[in-house]
Image (tube, coloured by chain):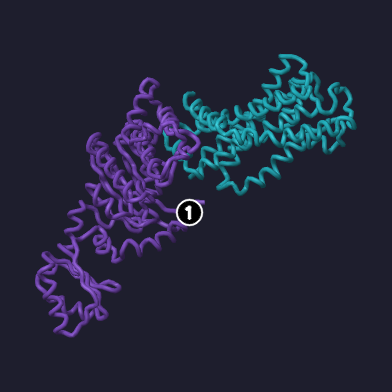
Amino acid sequence: MDIVYTLWLRSVKRYTRSKSRMVGSLGMPVFLLLVLGFGLNSVVAIPGMEQGYIGFIIPGIISMSVLFTSVFAGIQIIWDKQFGFLKETLVAPVSRLEIMLGQTFGGATTALIQGLMIFVLSLLIGLEISSIPGFLIAIVFMMLIGISFTAFGIAIASRMEDMHGFQLIMNFVIFPIFGLSGALFPIESLPGWVRYLTLLDPLTYGVEGIRYGLLGSSHIDPAICFVILSGFTILMVGFGSYLFRKISI
Amino acid sequence: MKMSAITVKDLTKKFGDFTAVNNLSFDIEKGEVFGLLGPNGAGKSTTMAMLSTMLKPSSGQAWVNGYDILRNEDEVRKSIGIVFQDPSLDEELTAYENMDFHARLYRIPKNERQKKITELLKLVELDEKKDNLVKTYSGGMRRRLEIARGLLHEPKVLFLDEPTLGLDPQTRNHLWDYIHRLNQEKGITIILTTHYMEEADKLCHRIAIIDKGQIIALDTSEKLKNDIGGDIITIVSSEKDNLYSVVESLPGINNIEVHDSSITIGLHNAEKHVAQIVNMASESGVPIDSISIHKPTLEDVFLHFTGRTIREEEATGKEQMRMMQRSRK
């Protein structure tokens, strides 16, 4: 446990130290929140949504922020590989699983902080949360998204030699995961085949879970969301640690 | 076997068709400074990687501090400190934080951690800059920090892979002093790789010259130089084959070798024989372009054993490195 904490501590220290990254990765979500939220608020009416379209997409934007930060935190292992720091951890008398878990929780923590920042901004532009327990539920879902996708990032990083493939992963894996998740539109209004795709996307259950927590209503039962997303998290941590164990430098 | 710090037996590593390390065997005693000297791509770093459990050997065995590198990985890792050839610090953290990270990884108890870190940072004279981010450090400071970090968990054996590569001469001298003192004061066994002759000569008790994955000579620096037979006379001549037959008859010659553009003669008290050689050459009408005498260096030793200078070897060494990296993917 000490080792996991050590790795966690390093990730968090690095994160809090780089203010530019912190602010930089807020840019895109805030931009989407403002442009889509205010731009479409008056034209789009979502049945059963009291807080309008902007209220509807806030959970989606929070998920996006957590998703991007966590995948990036996982992929950062490639930097450690290139700058040689990974060797220092790999040659220590500790298990790879401990290293991988430390990295995962570290990445998930930074992703959670990033998500909470969007949450605070949302409060400023008028979000009204349904209840305190609801807020805690939202936090749980943010953590699950953070852990599963940091582990996913580590899995990718374990197979990549350098950062060249990063754009590819972003465009063909991460954006589709975000786009299909129902972060920006209600799942119910989709045609049948797209809806199936959406239901295959693990992030959908994260978005819906956060939506239930913050707004008090969602299309998918939050208990189902929790079970599916937890299952996905366990799967990803297993997958990530399996690939990380085989990493070579 | 119990008394040795490191025992290597028939260690071999192949990357595809390329044999990086070929049947290496040697013993390093406790408290010794042992040098692996050779050009780039000779297999030095690969040997280090295997001994530090970073790389699995294709065949053969090795023990570090009495532990089998294949069966007791964790015990081996606890026994060694490593300074890698490439930098391995976290630049976004301070020197102290890098040390602290290492101390926690090696499970050094909380109450000892701070004391040891401060002590070691003082040793490498980085105490005053301990709270600066590593990215503000110079190359020499980073190296010193890495050495301090490698010593934090009190290893029995310290691995130094090209410790002074890319450093300016002054910093290099400084580092040599540290390494020497560490060995003297703390009795740590040190194994270091280098392709600087001077470094091996100055620091190491014994030196293994490695070429193409094999040990071609292993002894103390003194004995290796004696193998050449006294001083070295290097003669450059356009008719080196004629020259060879002329000087061959000179009494007291220990060895004589013909190279691409020169002849080297090994003999004692070379100063006394120079005039004689020049006379003999001019009597036979063999021109001499230049003639020089020097005390043997390890460079000569390398030339003697491989027929090449270490610089000629660099070029082909890089080719091999490239091949190796390709086959590792």
Position of residue A98 measured from the top left corner of the image (x, y, whole percent):
50, 30
Rendered location of residue A201, percent (x, y): 74, 34
**Would you identify the image quadrant in which residue B107 lies?**
top left
Relative to residue A194, is residue B226 depicted above or below?
below
Where residue A248 appears, as percent x and y from the top left, is 49, 44
Residue most extreme to the front: B128
**Who's the residue at 67% across and 26% down the image?**
A117
Badge count: 1
Q: Position of residue A113 (x, y in %)?
A: 63, 26
> Can you tell which quarter of the image residue B324 is in?
bottom left
Q: Name the residue: 20% across, 56% down.
A: B224
Q: Is residue A132 above or below residue B71?
A: above
Identify which amino acid the numbered label 1 is placed on.
Gln
Along the line of sight, the residue nearer the viewer: B48 or A16: A16
Left or right, B48 with respect to B298, comes to right
Secondary element at image label 1: helix
Residue B45 vs B125, above or below: the answer is below
Q: Which chain is cyan?
A: A
Q: Which chain is disc 1 placed on?
A: B
Residue drawn at x 21%, y 53% is B221
Judging from the image, what is the letter of the chain drawn in purple? B
The quadrant where residue B311 appears: bottom left
Q: Residues within 10 Å of mark 1 (few under 14, many from 20)?
A: few
Image side of residue A214 versus residue A245, left or right: right
Name the residue that disc number 1 marks: B325
Instruction: Residue B76: tell me if it is visible.
Output: no
- Residue A99 lies left or right of residue B185; in this view the side is right
